[in-house]
Amino acid sequence: MSDHHSEVLIDFQNVSKRYGAFRALRDVSFQVREGEIVGFLGPNGAGKTTAMRILSGFFPPTSGHVSIRGVDMSKHPHKAKQAIGYLPETVSLYPDMRVIEYLRFVAKVKGVPPHERWGHIRAKMSFCGLLEVSHRLIGKLSKGYRQRVGLAQALMGDPSVLILDEPTTGLDPTQIKEIRELIRALGQNRAVILSTHILPEASMLCNRVLMINQGEILASGTVQELASCLKNREVIHIRIKHREDRQHAVEALGSIQGVRGLRSGEEANGETFFAFESLPDEDLRPKITKLFVEQGISLAEIRREPMNLEEVFLGLLEEGKLGRRFS
Ligand SMILES: Nc1ncnc2c1ncn2[C@@H]1O[C@H](COP(=O)(O)OP(=O)(O)OP(=O)(O)O)[C@@H](O)[C@H]1O
Ligand SMILES: [Mg+2]
């Protein structure tokens, strides 16, 4: 775990990014210290990849400053980038190279001295579980193994900052477990930033989470704070078949005590959905089902689920916690 005495390895200061007129990041600031694993959590299009590309020096911000271990990315890009390992969202590897050739090439580019290269490559292959595929062509590897090659590539040169863009996407459950274990081990003496849509993944791996939505940090906090915000929060989802029943359903739901913050919308197949946050200690499903049946409302489905990320975002927005901490 980090404390306030450990070194600030990542400093992201008032960063904004525009793509043409579109504002993908709006005045985002945060710091990450040695020993911290920080999660970027947010829905599609939130700006996670954009922030990571700026961090890795892939492109500059429209305004704001980035420094890595105190080195300003815009002034000394080469030096700043040397301290960074980056696993991009889509790992672009060389399909016609063998794993070992590719890693040798990366080691050279990352400035690992020639006499240390072989030992270094072997250690990374061993750590990432690549020894048995070292002579295979990258293009012929499974997705999970390609992801491991991507991770080994990011680790080359022992960078003190690791940026991992959705490191577990597309992997099977066994591979996910293994990659998560690797990341946890890596976080101990580095600064790691990883992005995910998956809340349990963030809570499993990260000391701290930044919730990002529409280019802004919506909330930040430790995993404990996040967990207490989510604990026992559930949502009831309802679908009705016929459009004519919609108003009727709204009235029926309105008459039931405990139904608050009702959202509704139309599904692609013409059905209507409703969702609202469930009471923690009372299951309203039997009551709703009974009322709908009595009133002849065309109920297609009613289910109760743990609150998901999007709903937490909506909840936070509604509660006016913009930019605040969870607790
Ligand atoms: N090169 C680009 N040109 C124009 N718009 C872009 C470009 N790259 C990203 N965007 C837009 O910026 C916004 C943020 O994209 P970004 O890829 O950073 O999101 P993300 O949080 O990584 O999403 P995902 O979870 O889907 O990976 C999106 O609306 C996206 O369409
Ligand atoms: Mg992305």
Image (cartoon, helix red, strand yellow):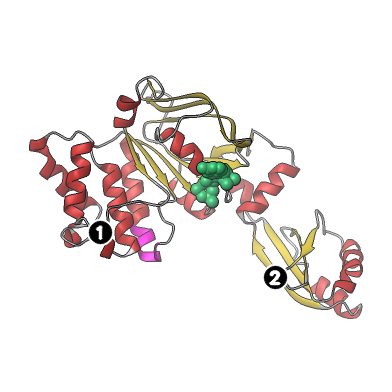
Callout 1 secondary element: helix
64 left or right, relative to 250: left
Q: Earlier in the sequence, mark 1 or mark 2?
A: 1
157 or 92: which is nearer to us? 92
Q: Main secondary structure of the magenta part?
A: helix
- In percent of width and height, residue 90 lies at 40, 52
**Residue 143 appears in the picture as rendered:** yes
Q: Tell me the mark number nearer the camera, choosing from 1 and 2.
A: 1
- In percent of width and height, residue 92 lies at 34, 51
Mark 2, residues whose alpha carbon is within 10 Å: few (<14), some, or many (≥20)?
Answer: few
**In which quadrant of the rendered image does the N terminus lie?**
top left
Q: Is residue 159 above or below residue 126?
A: above
Which disc number belongs to residue 138?
1
145 left or right, relative to 233: left
Which disc number belongs to residue 3?
none
**Residue 46 appears in the picture as rendered:** no
- In percent of width and height, residue 236 lies at 73, 64
Q: Quadrant of residue 114?
A: top left
Q: Is residue 298 magenta?
A: no
Q: Quadrant of residue 70?
A: top left
Which disc number belongs to residue 303?
2
Q: Give the extent of the magenta segment.
A: 171-178
Q: Count of labels shown?
A: 2
Q: Is residue 51 above or below residue 238?
A: above
Q: Is residue 155 above or below residue 2?
A: below
